[in-house]
Structure formats: structure tokens, C-alpha cells
Image: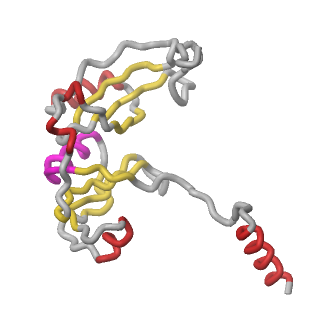
Amino acid sequence: MTARKDRNESQESTDAGVADSSWEVESLFHFIVNASHFEKSLDFYTTLGFRVLRDNRDIIWPPEVAENFGMPVAQGRGALLALGEGELHTRIDLIEWLEPRWEDAAASLPPESRVPRVIALRTRNVRAAYRDLKARGIEFIREPREANPSLGVESVACCLDPDGLVVELIEYMPGRLGSRIDDLPSRLS
């Protein structure tokens, strides 16, 4: 009787607009990175240090994939890639869309006029990463930034994936979880 009463009270509180506390988002599982040429993009991301967890390039997707995304049809070639170890490591789902074909509308604009799409990767020793990746053919926007103690940033270098996605390699000073913003001007002042 008590279990039924608890379920009924839980349902009543949900119906009354009170949040149901029986669920929570645990972590970011993955995000999709669109690729116009799967193999080129796979090579780029594995050069950055991602490893292939699951190679889906030859799998025919079931109808549920399209239904989940609210699409009439969805087919692609892809791979689930990861950085780090453990179940909460960073993952991307690299996909070359076959149906429908992915068209990057910004590609027709000059690079300086595009709003960038960015992935930021916390990186140990950005300057060494820059030298190594540049030597292996990765295209960078500019050389690594010098340290900026007022922001808590040791260095930043941004490279481009084969489709122009900006991959920001960022190194924070010891003890920093992110950039300091206290001394930056505000639009409100």
C-alpha cells in the first residue's frame, strides 16, 4: 500500500507542475561532428589523439535513427571516437551524412565572415602540441598565444578540421578550471 501511495503522490506532484526528481542528466555522452569526407576527418581526429571506440562506416542505420531526429530518412558513415579513459571520457560521433547530404551553408562565405563552430579541448602543453601537429600537416589559424595570467590561460592555439570546424587547444594555468573574467569589461557598465 505504501509503494502505491508513494507512486500516486509522485504522479500527483508531477501533474501539479512540481519537478520529478527521479531523473537527472549524468554527463555529455557525445556530440556529432559533421564531415564531408569521412576518412580525411577520421585521420585528423586520430592525429589529435582521439581513438576509435566503434567504427560505423559500413553500417546501415535502422529507421529509428531518422525517427529519433525527426527526419524522414537518415543514413551516414561514422565512428564514435574518444579521448581519455573511463565511461565519462570525451566522445565525438564523427559522421559523413549520406542521406540527407550535409551542406555547410557557411562554406560559401569568406573565412573571416563565418561564425565559427568550435570544439575546445583542454590540452597539456599547447606549444608542444602545436609544434607536433603542425609538423604532421595540421593547419593552424595562428601560433600559440603567450601566457595571460590575468585570464589564467597558459596558451591557446586553434587549428581547423577538414571541414573548417575550429578545434581550440587550450591550456590553463595550474589550479584553473576556466578563464578568469573578473577584470574584463561588461556590456552592462
What residue is at 76 percent from the left and 72 percent from the top?
A: 10
User: Residue 46 location, x and y as percent?
Assistant: 24, 46
* Quarter where residue 62 is shown: bottom left
User: Residue 150 location, x and y as percent?
Assistant: 52, 12
Task: Left or right? Give the position of 171 relative to 97.
Answer: right
Please name whichever residue, 157 or 136, is drawn nearer the observer in this view of the structure. Answer: 157
Instruction: State the extent of the magenta-drawn residues as a range.
Output: 35-48
Task: Left or right? Give the position of 6 relative to 52.
Answer: right
| Residue 42 part of the magenta segment | yes
What count of labels does the image hold?
Answer: 0
What residue is at 22 percent from the left and 67 percent from the top?
A: 75
Screen quadrant of the N terminus:
bottom right
User: Residue 89 location, x and y as percent?
Assistant: 45, 50
- The colour scheme of the drawn protein is secondary structure
What residue is at 21 percent from the left and 37 percent from the top?
A: 164
Screen quadrant of the C terminus:
top right
What residue is at 25 percent from the left and 31 percent from the top?
A: 114
* Quarter where residue 16 is shown: bottom right
Vertical arrangement, residue 108 with respect to residue 185, above or below: below
Q: Residue furthest right?
A: 2
| Residue 93 part of the magenta segment | no
User: Residue 108 location, x and y as percent?
Assistant: 14, 37
In terms of secondary structure, what is the magenta stretch mainly?
helix
Task: Left or right? Give the position of 83 relative to 138.
Answer: right
Q: Residue furthest bottom?
A: 1
Task: Left or right? Give the position of 78 relative to 37.
Answer: right
Vertical arrangement, residue 189 with respect to residue 103, above or below: above
Please name whichever residue, 16 or 147, is drawn nearer the observer in this view of the structure. Answer: 16
